[in-house]
Structures are given as structure tokens and as C-alpha cells.
Amino acid sequence: MAAELLGRGNDEFVNENYQKALELYTEAISVEPDKDEAYSHRAQAYIKLEQFKDAERDSGKAIELNPKNSRAFFRKGTALFHQEKYAAAKECLQIGLSLNNVDSSMKTLLQKCEAEIDLCMSEQSQGSSKISIGTSSVSPSTELGVNKAAPKDEAGPTVTSSSNSSSAITMPTGPRTRYDWYQTETMVIITVMIKKVQKEDCHIDINEQSVSVCIKLPTGTDYTLELDLAHKVLPEKSMYKIMSTKVEIKLKKAEGVRWTMLEDDGTTSVIKQATVPMDTQPESDQANRYPSSSHYTRDWDKVVTNITKEEKDENLEGDAALNNLFQKIYGDGSDETKKAMMKSFYESGGTVLSTNWKEVGEDKVEVKPPDGMEYKTWET
């Protein structure tokens, strides 16, 4: 039965057994290939496994089967975002929000897409400058009169000139690399934007107040990043993760304070508490801006604060108000609360929604239809 396989897949997904969930969703699709929900769920499993092309394909199939499936649009937008197809991701998310305008996760991802698009436009406009970063369209040996016998220094910029051209600075050729950072109340997350890094080629040392990164690039050169952190972290509770599109470093804060900057420049004297809302902070406070290593910045704390304020100010009624209440309970709940809500909802066919994991985690949740109604399963 497709519904049974789908329910079992959801159970495995809730327990973070994403590969097993993927297999069960695949079985459900083989039994009932026209069920958009199964494709949408399998797309989410692919996203967790970082198989973004497969997630894009499955969410696209779910949309084809049900053009009103807002979650399928969200998942396709997520898959496209991780493939750096920001314009297409933005279009998907806008459609998804037109179907479900109370989804704060979709709103936040849309803001990130817009930030990336603006960043790309900013970098393109800077590309006409005489300072060329990453690759150069001119040949150093012919246009700029470089001495061919001179040793090539790949570690830094080379200043060259010729009699028939003005001075120019050419950075060494190679893949463009940048890093971003943002923070939560307890963590600082640094993202190094390098694709397809092999585990054996990545060496990261996390110390109490410094981070050292060395990644061997496909060109044979090394990318290095040395950071003297603005505040102390707990190395034993910090970690890093190598993904297909980036390397993510998660640093556990030693103190629950907001960082006004990532690196220590000798001026970090005033520390603001993490619990102070962003809209009460001075404009000069640059924490949590995205991307932090570029000229274009976006204050993500302020974005989230504004979205939350807009949602609170909405006068919801009926099902919308009830859904908003459930979303708030789920969003504010612990991991056990979330697992309990997911498990009880799926196993009971949507007739039970419990927050007690000790109660629902012991056995399968029985279907409990409202008084005067009878629960039936459809034959497939």
C-alpha cells in the first residue's frame, strides 16, 4: 500500500534515517506513481542527503502532478538555491508563497536568494574595474609585458605595466573563493564557498580564539584562511562539515553574547547580550549580516524580526489561525516535541497531534476521528 509505505518513510525521516526514508518513498512511488506527496517527500529526503539535482527533479514532478503543492515549490526552490541557480529558485519560492504566504522558512530563503542575486550583480558591475580578481581576460605575457623568465608567484598579486597600457593589478588565476558568517545565540557559523572538497584535502584546526583552514584546490594550490576570533569559543563543542557546495564550520560560543564582528581588530570592548532584539540595536552594529565577506550586506536578524512581527500583526481566522498556532508550537518546541508532533500526525492520518514524545514514541499512534465521523482508507 502506497499510503503505508509513505507513512513508514515519514517515520524514518522524523528519526533522521534519511536513506531508509528515501527507499520507502521510492517504493511508495513504484506502487502509486501519480502521488505528488510521495515525490515531494522524497525530494526533501534528497535535500537532507545533499543530492540536489535529484531533489529538483522530484519536486518538479510533484508540481507537475499538483500545481498547488506549495511545499513542492519550496523544496524545488531549496534544491535550486543549493545549486546556485538563484533566479530560478526565487521564481519557485515566489509561486510557493503565493500559495502559502504564512511560511516563514520560505520567506527567509527568498530573502537569501535576493541577497545572492544582488551580490552577483554587484560583482559583475565591479568586473569592469582595472582590478581583476580571480581570472584575467588578458594574457600577462603579451598585453602587460611580463618577463617570461621571471618566477611566477601564485601566492599574491603581481603589479605589471607596459608602454602602451596603463598600470593594472592582476590577481592569480583560479576559482573565486569567499567566506561568509552568521550567528545564533549559541553558535557562530562560518561558510567557505568551495565546491566538491574531498575530506582528505581539508584540514581545519579550531582553537579557543582562532580558526585555521587549509584546503587543497583541484588546481593543486592551497586555499588558506586564518582567523583571530573576536571572542572565545569552545573547541571541544565545535565542529565542521564538508558539503558538496561548501565547507561549514560551527563554533560553540564560550559566552552567550552577540558578536559585533568575526575577527578581533583590537576594538572589541563593548559586548551586547544575545537576547537584545536587533531592532533596538544601533545601525552601526554589523552582526549577522549576509554575506559578511562582501560589499553587499543584509541583516538577517532584522529580516527574521520583521517577518515575525508581520506574522504577529496578521489577523488570522479559522484554519489559518489554527495552522499558525500549530506552527508556533512546532517552531518553539524541543526536538522531542517536534518528533512527537510529526509522528502522531502521520501515524494517525492527521487525526491526532500530540507533543508528548514519551507517550507517542512507545507505540504506533491510533487513528482517532472526530465524534460522528468514520475514518476510511482508500484502496489503491
Image (cartoon, rainbow, N blue to C red):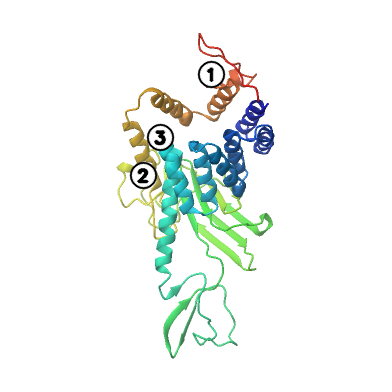
**Residue that carries the numbered disc 2 in the rendered image:** 302
Secondary structure of the residue carrying numbered label 2: helix
Question: What amino acid does circle 2 point to?
Answer: Lys
The x and y percentages for residue 361 are 62, 22
Q: On the image, which quarter does residue 65 sit in?
A: top right
Mark 2 to mark 3 CA distance (whole Å): 18 Å
Residue 154 visible in rendering: yes
Q: As displayed, is residue 379 above or below residue 66?
A: above
In the picture provided, is 28 more to the left or to the right than 330?
Answer: right
| Residue drawn at 41 percent across, 28 percent down | 324
Question: What amino acid does circle 1 point to?
Answer: Thr
Query: Which quadrant holds the C terminus?
Result: top right
Mark 1 to mark 2 CA distance (whole Å): 37 Å
**Residue that carries the numbered disc 1 in the rendered image:** 351
Q: On the image, which quarter does residue 8 sit in?
A: top right
1 or 2: mark nearer the eye: 1
Question: Between disc 3 and disc 1, whose residue precedes?
Answer: 3
The x and y percentages for residue 52 are 59, 48
| Residue drawn at 44 percent across, 42 percent down | 95
